[in-house]
Amino acid sequence: MRDGIAWSNDLLTLAARFAGRVAVTDGVATMDYATLSARAHALAHRLRAAGQHAAGLHPGTPVATLVPNGIDAPWVSCGVTIAGAAEVAVNAHSTDAEILWYAELAGFRRILAPAAQAARLAALGLDPWPIEDVAPDPGAPALPPVPEDAWGRIIFTSGTTGRPKAIVHTHGGRWTAHLLQRAVLPFTPGEGDRVLLMTPFVHGASLITAAWLEQGAEVVLQDGVRADRLASVMEGTPPAAIFAPPTVLAKLLSLYPGRRFEGVRVIFCGTATLTRDLWQRAADAFGPVVRVTYGMSECFNPITVLEPAEVQAAMAEADDGLGAHLGWPAPGVEVSIRGEDGAALPHGEPGEIFLRARHMTAGTITAAGFAARPAGGWHRTGDLGAIDARGRLRLSGRAADLMKTGGYRVHPAEIEAALDGAAGGQAICVLGIPSDYWGEVVVAVAETPPSGWEDAARERLSVLARAKHPRAFIALPELPRNAQGKVVRARVREAVLAGHVLEDGPHPRLAARGPT
C-alpha cells in the first residue's frame, strides 16, 4: 500500500530488536518489548476480525480506550493503532456523563477497559472489551500499513472554556508527530534510560512514551504523584527524564523537601506557565534541567521548544511584560501573532497566537458535527502572547480569561506572575467576580497558603498599576483542576462564590456567607 503508515511492521521490529528488554513498568509490574508487541498484535487481529461483521472496522473506525496509567496502557494504545482504527483516548478518571458525551461526539460503542469497568460501561449502552481477555499472541502476523489520511486518534479538549470538543488527528499526522518528538529530544535514550510519567497517558504522556519505546528505552507509568510508588523509582538511581507539568512538579518537590537528586538529565515541562519560584526550587533539587515546550490538543508536541540552558537564561532575564518564555518554533511549525483585526503583528507586539503545522488536527467535532481544518489553514489558539526580539514565543494568558475592571483590560496571568512565591510555593489563581459597579472585581485565590500570605502578596503587587491589584485575597483548601492538572478558573470562581458574597460599590469586598 502506497502512502501507508506501517505501524505493525515497526512494532514487530522493536520486539525483535529489544525482545526481553523492559519496555514499561508501573514501579511494581513490568512488561518487556516482546510481550507488549504480542498483546498489541493479538488485540489488533481481534479488532479486525470483529470488524468483518456488523458495521465493520474500516480504517479510521473509532474505538475507545479507558485504561489507567500502568503497564497496560501502551499495548492497548498500540493494538488499536496498528489495527488501523481511530483510538479515542478517554481519561480513566472520566465521569459517566463525560464518557457519554465523548461517545456522542466521536461515535464509538466499543471501548477497551479493565474488567472492573465492564458493568459500568455496559450500563451506559457501550460495548466494553475487558483488556484482561486479550492474551499475547507471539506468532501473530504483521498487519498491512494504514492509510495516512485515515482518522488515527481522537482526543478531547479540557473544557476549561466550555463543553469539551473532540480533536481528530490522522494516522499520518500522528506518525509525523512521533518523528518530530524524537527529532527534538535533548538526548537519545537507550537501554536503562527511564522516563517517569505521572500525567494521564491519554495526553502528553503517550507521545513521550512512544518516543522512548521507539529507542528501546524504559517507560515508568504511574497514575498520579503517589509517594508509595515513587519511592522505588526515585531512590537509588533516579530516572533519566521526568515529564512534570508545573502542578506535577510542585507535588513531586513537596514529597522531597530539601532533597537533591543527581542523574536526572531533563524534566519535560509544559501545559501551564512555569514560574520563576517553581523553576528555582526544581533547579535546587535536580539542577537546571527543566525544558519547556508548548502544546495543545489541536497540535501534537512539539510546537515550541526551550532547552534547559535556555530556560535558565530566560529565568535570569528582567521581566519585560511579554509573558512566559515558550521557546522557538519546532521543525515544521509556523507561529503568527495577530491583532483583533486578524492582521499579523510585528515582534514585540502582543496579540493572539496562531499556529500552522504539518502535524496539526484534521478537524474538530462539536455538537454540530465534524468540521475539517481547511488545507493550509491557521489554528486560532485562544492564547495571548508575543514574539520577542530574539524570535521566541511568549505567553501571557488566555483570551477568554481577560478581565475588564473599571474600564481597564487586565489579564490574570500578569498578576499571577507578580504574585509568584507569595503563597509559600502554593498555587495562586487570579480571577474576576462580576460587579455592576466595576464590571469585574479582581480577586486572588491561593491553595492552602501559609498565614500572612496576603501581606507578602501586597508587597509583590507594588510593581503593577493600581487597577491590577486584587480587591480580595481568598484561601481555598484546593484549587479545582481538570484532568491535565490545569486550574479551571471558572470552577475556582464558583468555589469562591459558594462561600462568599460580593458587597459591591466603590470599595467592594467579599464577605463570607453565613450558615444557611
Image (spheres, grey):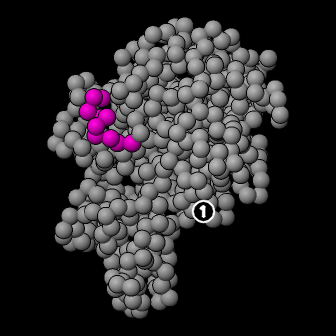
* Amino acid at dot 1: Gly
Image quadrant assignment for residue 495: bottom left
Give x and y (percent) for residue 140: 65, 12
Q: Image check: 241 left or right of 119?
A: left
The N terminus sits in image quarter: top right
Give x and y (percent) for residue 352: 57, 58
Which residue is located at x 42 percent, y 61 percent? 480
Give x and y (percent) for residue 89: 60, 40
Give x and y (percent) for residue 51: 78, 28
Residue 8 falls inside the magenta stretch:
no
Image quadrant assignment for residue 227: top left
Mark 1 Cα-neighbour bin, 10 Å: few <14, some 14–19, many ≥20: few
**Please, is residue 217 above or below residue 63 in the view?**
above
Can residue 125 be seen in this snapshot?
yes
Per the picture, the main secondary structure of the magenta-coloured stretch is helix
The magenta segment is: 224-233
Number of numbered discs: 1
Viewer-proximal residue among 172 and 80: 80
Q: Image check: 242 left or right of 168?
A: left
Q: In the structure shown, which secondary structural element does the residue marked by tag 1 occupy?
A: loop
The C terminus sits in image quarter: bottom left
Viewer-proximal residue among 97 and 503: 97
Can residue 356 be seen in this snapshot?
no
Viewer-proximal residue among 377 and 271: 271
**Please, is residue 509 above or below residue 397 in the view?**
below
Report which residue position mark 1 lands on: 162
Which residue is located at x 20 percent, y 64 percent? 450
Which residue is located at x 59 percent, y 33 percent? 130
